[in-house]
Image (cartoon, helix red, strand yellow):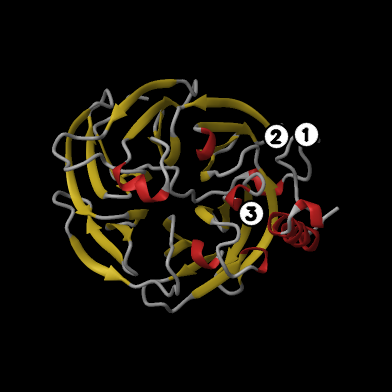
Amino acid sequence: MKNKNEKIVVSTHSFLVVICLSEKLEVTDHLVVNKGHHYGVALGDEYFVSKNKDKFFEKRKYEKPYESVNRVEPPVQGKEIHQICFANSGYYVADTYNNRVIYFKENNEVLHVHNLYSFDDDYNHVNSVFPCGNIIFALLHNHGREPSEIVALRHTPSRGFSRVRGLRLWHEGCHNIFLDDEHLYYNASGNGYFVVANTSTGEVVKKVELNGHTKGMAVFGDTILVGVSEFAQQEDRPEARGLIAILDRSSLNLKSMVDVNFDTLPRPIGNINEIRCLTGGDEAHSRRCHTRLHEMASLNSSSPLECIKNYKSRILHHLRMDWRRLVPSQLRA
């Protein structure tokens, strides 16, 4: 499939930038839409919506200069929201600070909340949401205590969220989820990898080493874009340099790395948080159809991508992990 001219929006610790790409996926133009820390970007029918450090979502036009036309106030109490998506006529939000996934409509007429493992602080660091029809996948970073995991939630307008299953990943400190009919894609951010697993066999089929903090993903046509930033402590991330990795979706091979630290910026672009395609067809934002990942009864027994069968035992496991982290080893003997 031949690429057309594309526009992508990139949110970072310092800027919100729209970048124009040619058919060869080379940068032809860019515009700084806003300054400051930005994270989630949702794609609506008429507007795209960006989240910055204040409590509002900014609705912006898809056409240059991408001006803000309205603000949406999410029903969220707390400091941190990460990824946001627009699907099923409302917003799905990774409410990281409160360790939960929420769904709401702009008039706040509908509000559904699901706390992960019953914790109400940033215990699991839920940072990504990916709607597939009425199944919503949430990615739990887990703060490096153990490998990251995915929780599948069923969402219905009348009953809200109900948990379906949990799936362990191969790596710690992960971000982003994308699922198609055959594969699971995610960023193993702490390791600097982009990872693809077969959902039938539960085996990793590709691990692309990108030599940086991988975060942010867009998928359109035969192209996958992944944000790659230099590793940095939180306080240094506004000054971090960022690149965009371009991968071929069929072969999963790296095609090129695009430098987005434009000379017109007063400093490097900052740690990349999100990438969305503004010209349509960004599959990594959401899917209308189901994926079979949550329906599988079993997987390869050697795969960590296995069903977490007992919800109560999983909660106890998290409590044990937290206890081991807090209590010195000599007191656990």
Packing grade of label 1 (10 A; few <14, some 14-19, many >=20) is few
Residue 180 relative to residue 222: left or right: right
Amino acid on which disc 2 is placed: Gly
Q: Position of residue 176 (x, y in %)?
A: 50, 45
- Label 3 and label 1: CA atoms lie apart by 19 Å
- First along the sequence among labels 1 and 2: 2
Reading the image, the residue beneath label 1 is: 300
Packing grade of label 2 (10 A; few <14, some 14-19, many >=20) is many
Reading the image, the residue beneath label 3 is: 151
Amino acid on which disc 3 is placed: Val
Q: Position of residue 192 (x, y in %)?
A: 49, 32
Q: Residue at x 62, y 59 (%)?
A: 153
Q: Position of residue 37 (x, y in %)?
A: 31, 55
Identify the secondary structure beneath mark 2. Answer: loop
Nearest the viewer among 227 and 198 is 227
Reading the image, the residue beneath label 2 is: 202
- Label 1 and label 2: CA atoms lie apart by 6 Å
Q: Is residue 274 visible?
A: no
